[in-house]
Image (cartoon, rainbow, N blue to C red):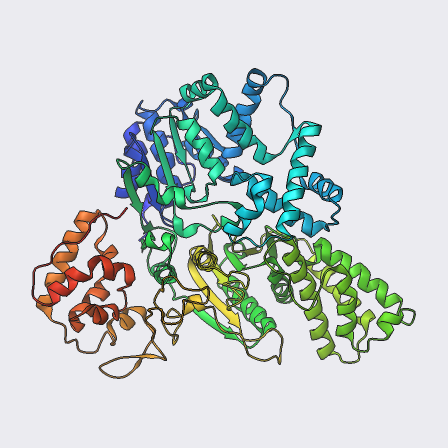
Amino acid sequence: MVTAATHSPAFPPVAETADDVLLGLDPEQREVATTLRGPVCVLAGAGTGKTRAITHRIAYGVRAGILPPAGVLAVTFTNRAAGEMRGRLRALGAAGVQARTFHSAALRQLQYFWPRAVGGELPRLVERKIQLVAEAAARCGLRLDRNELRDVTGEIEWAKVTQTVPVDYAAAALKAHREPPRDAAEISQVYGLYEQLKRDRMVIDFEDVLLLTVGILQDRQDIAEQIRTQYQHFVVDEYQDVSPLQQRLLDLWLGDRDSLCVVGDASQTIYSFTGATPDHLLDFRNRYPQATLVKLVRDYRSTPQVVHLANGVLAQARGRAAEHRLELVSQRDGGPDPAYAEYPDEPAEAEGVARRIRDLIDAGVPAGEIAVLFRINAQSEVYEQALADAGVPYQLRGAERFFERQEVRKALVSLRGAAHSRGNDPLLDAVVDLASQVRAVLSAHGWSPQPPAGSGAVRDQWESLAALVRLAEDFSRAKPAAGLGDLVVELDERAAAQHAPTVQGVTLASLHAAKGLEWDAVFLVGLTDGMLPITYAKTDDQVEEERRLLYVGVTRARIHLTLSWALSRAPGGRSSRRPSRFLNGLRPGSAATAPRTGGSAAGGPPGGRSRTRRGPVRCRVCGKTLTDAGEMKLMRCEDCPSDMDEGLYDRLREWRAEQARQLGQPAFCVFTDKTLMAIAEAAPGDPGELAMISGVGRRKLDRFGTDVLAICAGQEPGGSDGDDA
């Protein structure tokens, strides 16, 4: 059942009284809204109505006369989110509250206080720093193409938000396991000269806006006090995404006060490559021991089937963020189970997805309520083509259409020129087959047999060119007698077909670009090892961020969810790919692997402790293969007779209720009903036997194992640690 807690109109009528603001909130949202004193930390899972909770909190405080509208600063990370927050606050009768991004709030303060703190006018803001980076690189004797410039610029931005100066860049990048696009010493040199050029020309960049505001507030106590007098209360959304520099600015805004409410979800941290870190969220209660902690776990967005899968994706996670994961509980009526689809090759996968989308549209699902999400933008081309062939309108989000990308346009120009010069180009004339000719032409644009190391624009460019090479290979197989001119005609026709304007269409987007959005139907495609997790995710932390990307993708779906992968790249290719390891234990017939600690990106060191089911899971009563997650926990069919000790089950339920009361959490956060039944049926006698029960991971074994084993042995539990910081 979907309650009014998140599905009331986006702009409801203005509430008559302060108490009216609280109408329609669930108990946890209401606690957020009414806890107006002291530090508050809200751990909010996907789809749990966090924006609703914090906007109603601000509005309730304003309408009750507790918070002065002009004294509240709500901070978020995108202009879209800030605009949405302002709209909701106006609708709730709290129009005077400031809702801004970190950069917008800092720039406003910098413009106001600069004449007083420094004198004169604020230096001009450079919106595109890439030109200055290019000049700095040239002065260092480095020739960087457009994509390398983007990557080096990204490294400079990362260094600045992590408060790393040029001389320290190389050491900091090594410590952070970054893979710089150039030698770290070269980037350090470019970074230093870039900063010098800005000083010489009296210009600043976006990161300087934060750095200079921090500098003024640190040096000028009078200005800091004026800002603190203006703003007495702060709310920070998406707190898992704050950088060290943004946290420093927030600290200076606060001073020695603690009137702060932060909202976030460590399981949705997917931007660490930009300097974002969930550490500030996870350390909040260490910093503010008296803080009120509220967990929002009621999911109003997705069906129980989608939520169950989302919880399963994180169940095998490891690392610090995983220790604080939220177990979501759907508030919607049931829907279809997530579908899993395996295809022989990528074109077949794209065609299959297009067919399913066509069926959904024919069944009444609007095209605008459907999304295809992938790991990297270069994957879009085959889906653009498949949807165009199926007559399904689409729109790309966060990326140019494949044939509109600069590197693709330049490559087409070169291929067209090469086709015209056939017979006059000794290099091309020496190459017989079409695919080799294309490789020879594109090698001048950055294509190579092996991809470049790391991520970034250079890798994106290579992926686009590699997609053209694959198109040429496929075209050559389909038409062995075709030449370079025939391929150019084919590519031009594809480009023309996909340039057709679309209005209401299926969204094609990367998983990163999909953050914060939702659709009725979501297709997660290309889910193979090497793509998710991506090949260049080497460390445990990097692999876990890839897992969180999948979690974000799953939680974008309201009703329909399809996960698919292809066993080979091209038709007739060797079926060497494997489905993403993140689907192990989730897709029917796969082995479930428990989390390991201290392991490698591939899943832990030799000899590490693990729990793996090999082959299909079968009912221990009738022998039938089990695919339902609940039945797999019990190791038997729901309809098969149970040998559960009813008395033991009752004692476990009583113990669980007391634990839940102490923790201030729903009972399922201790153990689900199915896990409790499995424990009562197995009556484990030692930690090893308890660990083999699905739903008892390392963390719960360490935390609750002693109590559970005592109860199973007919003894009184000794008490578990109830601190869930």
Q: In the image, what residue occupies the spot 56% across and 42% down?
A: 168
In front here: 503 or 553?
A: 553
Relative to the observer, which residue lies in front, 590 or 190?
190
Residue name at image x 36 percent, y 55 percent: 322
Q: Residue furthest bottom?
A: 623
Among all residues in the image, which is located at the extreme right?
424
The answer to whether residue 128 shows anywhere in this view is: no
Seen in the image, is 666 located left or right of residue 581? Answer: left
Q: Position of residue 551 (x, y in %)?
A: 43, 57
Q: Quadrant of residue 115?
A: top right
- The x, y position of residue 697, in whole percent, is 29, 63
Quadrant position of residue 598? bottom left
When the figure is inspected, residue 237 is found, relative to residue 144, above or below; the finding is above
Q: Nearer the viewer, residue 474 or 368?
A: 474
Is residue 592 depicted above or below 187 in this figure? below
Quarter of image, res 493: bottom right
Viewer-proximal residue, 527 or 492?
527
- In the image: residue 659, left or right of residue 698: left
Q: Residue at x 24, y 72 (%)?
A: 634
Q: Please give left or right for residue 466 compared with residue 175 in the image.
A: right
Q: Which residue is rendered at x = 70% and y = 29% of the image?
A: 200
* Number of marks: 0
Residue 289 visible to the viewer: yes
Q: State left or right for residue 184 relative to residue 308.
A: right
User: Percent x, y for residue 470?
Assistant: 68, 70
